Image (cartoon, rainbow, N blue to C red):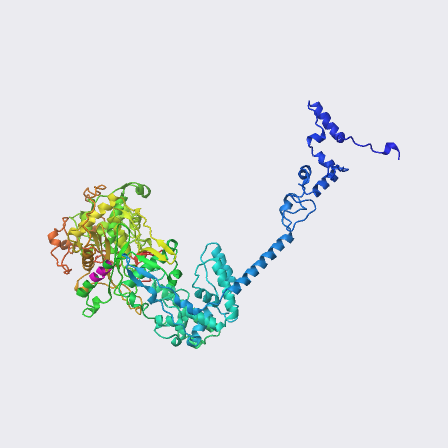
Amino acid sequence: MSEHRRKPPQPQGGGRAAARRGQSGSSSGRRAAPRGATGSPSESYRTGSRGSGGEERQYGSRAEARRAAQRGGGGRRAGSAGPGRGRGRGAPPGKRRIIDYPRHDKYGWRRWMPSWKLVSGLCLAFLGSMVAVAGIGYALVGVPDVAKTAQAQNNVYYWADGSQMVATGGERNRQIVGLAQIPKAMQNAVIAQENKTFYDDKGIDPKGIARALFNMAKGGETQGGSTITQQYVKNAMLDDQSQTISRKFKEVLVSVKVGATVDKNKILEGYLNSAYYGRGAYGIQAAARAYFNKDAIQLNEGQCAFLAAVLKGATYYDPAGATSIDPVGATPAKNKKRAERQMQDTLDKMVEYGLLDAGTRGEYPELPHVQNPRSNTALSGQVGYLVDLAKAYIVNNSEETGITASDLEQGGYSIYTTFDRKKVEELEKSVKKVYKQNIKPKERPETDTHVQFGGASVDPATGAIRAIYGGEDATKHFTNNADATGAQVGSTFKPFVLAAAMKWGVRDPELDPDQAQDERTQVSEKSLYPGKNKLKIKNYDGSIWQNEKGEEWLQVNDGDVSYGTPPDYKIDLREAMRESVNSSFVQLGMDVGLDKVKEAAVDAGILESSLAGTDYPSFSIGTSNPSAIRMAGAYATFASSGKQRTPFSVKKVTSKNGTVFTHKTETKQAFTSLVADNVTDVLKTVVEKGTGTNAQLAGREVAGKTGTTDGNKSAWFVGYTPQLSTAITMFRYPDDESIKDRQFLEMFGTGGQKKIHGASFPSVIWADYMEDALKNLPPVKFPVPQPIGEIVNDIPTPSATPTPSETVETTPTPSETPTQKPGKSPTPTETTTCDPFDFTCDDGGGDTGGNGQGGTDTGGTDGGVTTSPTPTATDGSGDDKGGNGNGGGGLFGGPAA
């Protein structure tokens, strides 16, 4: 081969390019270092690997060197890094690992992407391990014995002094019966409603399990098993009632084993004998006795369908209601509606699935009659109400207590309540004393039947409920009258109006609404307001108030009495409170703003859900229906100089594992001490020489307020000393559930009295009870308040030419003139000459008022307006107890004492 055709060898220095770089470096004044000394990447193009003797291997081109470096597993960096670093962390070249991760034959980000072989292998390994775990678990779990579920533990309730009140085990009852003793209709009803594929499935519902696991994983509400087998297993697993994924997994395994090894009829029998039907009844035999007082075998198709409906949750399906747990959603009326709907649905499904003929189904168009919901004599008297109140507090505050309704039903808890045994007994004795002396249902059936009382005492220092009176007997009367009754509170609401006026003040009538909200004048109790009967109510700016129909409001006082001196009839707020003058407080509420009146009531401790008619002038005189517990608690806020503490009934709960819950009192400053103490000072006048003189206690300062409502359908006295706040209510309401559209009844003539006031029986009961309740406590005086606010309306009203619409109002009618009272209040001797039970004598005035419903331009004792507006918010359309408002006046409305 000719010499000129052969390519001459390149210089060892790196070729022409290197030479040019060297020349360039030289021209810039720097000397290029030898290639071997610089560690240049070009070195890797020429150097691949060294043999054992250290001899260097040469490559013919850069591309070849680069491929060689890549095969080494480390790229350029690995190639220049020296021996032992080419294939990743310490792995020698060419040697493969069991788990090839990071991947040996990839570089960059691809090294960290697992191969499909690795992924599929791991999945198979995981599934295999799960199968193994399931197999082991299946082998280890046993089939539950339904007989053991009858051994659920008692809950023991204790008085405030630590002595035992009652163990509720006597209320729980179960008697296991064979399937032959359970009507076929009951079996079919449960299958049709809960698990129509029962005889064909394998014991579990995969979709239901996935749904439950998903809900638990995300922290949502847990769900139980959806098949009868799963529910039976859940009922039988009393050793573990926690709602966790591990527990659910165990439940599934047991269900699969039960479904595979136990006869379906045995499973159905076990479920019907272990299910909870409410009223302390576990199992179908106990349920038949609790609801119908008969054996299970005697149940008809309608009764069976009803019991199948109750299985969805007795709290919301027992026709007797569960207002102690949910005073708004679990009223008897709402529960009946739900139960009937569910019962009819069950019967329809039984027909649809061929389990019942249409003719028989037609025999049951409505709910069957059920009996007394309480049969445990240990819960008679007031004890049943106390237990219900404590249970409701625990369940409705489950986020704090950590105890659900299901947990409580399983038992094993020691529950230490706030109830003072002696105070409970004294309150019951005081009520029965007045009832026995005055209420004669046999002698006066038209006026004295269906008379009921309720009461509650709260400790102002802590909020602890010390005593309640829930009714005649918890085994006979099932609504706790201390909690949710629906009875309007009347004029006992007026202190919240005064507190709002002293806290925020009245608005300036010269300003527009936005400015007026900020520019206010705090009110002194010496402020003057009209005491005129049939007062035409105005907005804060002086314009006449009208409802949505354009109707005006004339506010009457009890007995059509005007207070003050013509022509303006102004009296100060102390006198208005003492004589319970409706017109003064209705107008004051309008000047302050009904939104502020509402805020003051809620701040004091009234549940917002119990407030009604908040947009109507009559809101200020008590169209709402708080419970006796809440009223006592709200007045306790005034007793403690403005410190509000929510009423509670349980101070501690323990179990075999130790203390589960301890109550912690939270105190809020609802009102300044200046406001609260001034309200108390005004309320002292009511008892000293006003409508509440029957509530005076020897040697003790008392503050309180009487209250009577529209139509004389309820009467209240709420009062307090610095050590104890107590509310007493009285009303007429039929207990007979067979009476449709039950409503509160008037109390004209009740107890032999012309009319029932808060100043009558309620205040007498209050005083008799409080004398004994405070017997061992030293008298304590209320704080002496500093003056507050400014005297509003102290300038005489200028004479004005009346408009046509006002002419009739500015000229007193003949009927008003004789009943007009002077601005000066009656003297104490005038108000204390009445016998304690002689309520027909003139005790100085009215404490009721109209709410504008059914009133006319002639007034009347029930209130009225010129054209009878009918505010929809206070029309008594609720579901329970005659339906005052929304039925949410209970302590837990929302979630409970």
Q: Which quarter of the figure is the C terminus placed in?
A: bottom left
- Pick out the residue farthest to the right: 2
The residue at the point 81 percent across, 32 percent down is 9
Give the number of callouts. Answer: 0
Q: Going by the picture, which residue comes out furthest to the front?
A: 53
- The residue closer to the viewer here, 42 or 625, is 42
In this picture, residue 33 sits left or right of residue 843: right
Residue 185 lies, in percent from the top left, at 43, 74
When the figure is inspected, residue 641 is found, relative to residue 416, above or below; the finding is: above
- Snapshot quadrant of residue 316: bottom left
Q: Would you say residue 516 sits in the magenta stretch?
A: no
Residue 321 image position (x, y, % from top left): 34, 64
In the image, is 320 to the left or to the right of 308? left
Q: Where residue 545 sits: x, y (%)?
A: 28, 50
Front-most of residues 569 and 588: 588
* Residue 595 seen in the current view: yes
Quadrant, the N terminus: top right
Pick the residue in front: 653 or 538: 653
In the displayed structure, would residue 331 be above or below residue 563? below
- On the image, which quarter does residue 716 sit in? bottom left
Q: Nearer the viewer, residue 597 or 294?
A: 294
**Residue 804 in view (yes/no):** no
The reply, left or right, for residue 235 in relation to residue 116 is: left
Across and down, in percent, residue 581 comes to 20, 52
Judged by its main secondary structure, the magenta piece is helix
Magenta residues, start to end:
423-430
Does the stretch in magenta take in 425?
yes
Picture quadrant of residue 161: bottom left
